[in-house]
Amino acid sequence: MTLMTWTFSPEHVSTPDAAALRRDYLDDVASRYWKRPATREELDEGLTGDGAELLTPPTGQFLVARYEGKPAGCGGVLLLDEDRAELTRVFLRHAFRGLGGAGALLARLEDEARGLGARRMVLNTRLDLVEARALYTRHGYDEIPAYCTGPYMDIWYGKDL
């Protein structure tokens, strides 16, 4: 395994690769939540007005991860205040998992948050997203009290940058 095959680039959420990855991310987490495939209409609705346009400087950043040039994953950071950034939409397509990209993507997103001035990263996720939870704890994230609420939030994590 070599990380040299992974690249990470800031992209606007509306580029073709970024938009397709955001859709795949939502399809994956929604289908797991509902325990059935999400419909095209449900995905369209979920992507409409989801706030992704804030994932651009100075309020955030969105990265596209590529493995050997192929769009493989994505992730974003959103500034919540002058000290904290929220990790969001972290996703690797299933075919690219186990190749070292998740940890490298997480590290790059932390670098992006630092570059935006954040000193702490926080995130929320669901209990059923066990792979994501394992990734976060493996990279130094600890469970924290809830900093926000919502229907798809079961557990919150934080890490000093």
Image (cartoon, rainbow, N blue to C red):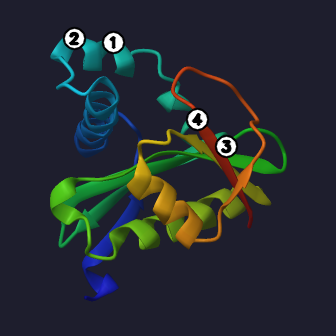
Question: In the picture, which quadrant includes the N terminus?
Answer: bottom left
Residue at the spot of label 2:
41
Q: Are marks 4 and 1 in contact (CB under 8 Å)?
A: no
Give the residue type that dot 2 points to: Glu
Q: Residues within 10 Å of mark 2 (few under 14, many from 20)?
A: few
Q: Residues within 10 Å of mark 4 (few under 14, many from 20)?
A: few
| Distance Cα–Cα, label 4 vs label 2 | 25 Å
Q: Is residue 144 above or below residue 15?
A: below
Residue 57 visible in the displayed image: no
Number of the front mark, 1 or 3? 1
Q: Which mark is residue 45?
A: 1
Image position of 9 (left or right of 122): left
**Pointer 2 or 3: first along the chain:** 2
Residue at the spot of label 3:
58
Residue at the spot of label 4:
154
Quarter of image, res 153: top right
| Distance Cα–Cα, label 4 vs label 1 | 22 Å
What is the x, y in percent for residue 62?
47, 48
**Pointer 4 or 3: first along the chain:** 3
Number of the front mark, 4 or 2? 4
